[in-house]
Image (cartoon, rainbow, N blue to C red):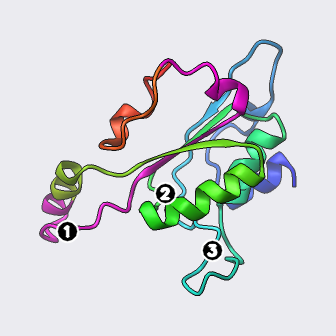
Amino acid sequence: MTAQDVNAQLQWQGDWDVLERRTGDLIVVFPNSTGRMDPKIDNREANALPRLPYAVFLIESGIADMVAIVDAQVDSAKWHNVNMYCKKCDVTGFYGPTSNAVSRMENIVSAQGTSSSTSVGTLLLMTNMVAGQMCQMPQQQTVAKLTPLF
């Protein structure tokens, strides 16, 4: 897998050269995956088309230090699958569900009423070294609390 494979799978838009690391850089990538982050499908078999391996590859290969994935479409059950996958790859992950207030606001704006689902969520994946530098653990109530932790 290469950076170009990741660009194609995550439908990268913009300057592909941003993934080229220089000494001393801390590279944080913020893709919007629009789901497909769960490495399993409903019958617990491997998902043939997940986007998680591409996000993890960015970290494993040293292209990025952190990948913050918005619109991951992960709930607590899917987070378990994602977390197990990350641990096998020696990547630290955190999950932040979308808050009820944000879900309500998004549904009101889209005129679809309210929903009890908060599965949109955000994933924050990082190298173990970066995770070791965190000042506090992420709160599990709102996506906005995930990134200002350093």
Label 1 to label 2: alpha-carbon separation: 17 Å
Which residue appears farthest toward the right when viewing the image?
1
Q: Which residue is mark 3?
A: 40
Q: Is residue 148 above or below residue 76?
A: above
Residue 72: mark in rendering: 2
Question: Could you tell me which residue is drawn at 68 percent across and 74 percent down?
Answer: 49
Q: Quadrant of the N terminus?
A: bottom right
Place of residue 52 in the rendered image (x, y in percent of width and height, measured from the top left): 66, 58
N-terminal label among 3 and 1: 3
**Element type where label 3 sits in the image:** loop
Residue 115: mark in rendering: 1
N-terminal label among 1 and 2: 2
**Tag 3–tag 1 contact (CB < 8 Å):** no
Which residue appears farthest toward the top when viewing the image?
24
Place of residue 72 in the rendered image (x, y in percent of width and height, measured from the top left): 49, 57
Label 2 to label 3: alpha-carbon separation: 14 Å
Place of residue 114 in the rendered image (x, y in percent of width and height, measured from the top left): 14, 67
Chain part drawn in magenta: 107-135
Q: Is residue 145 above or below residue 13?
A: above
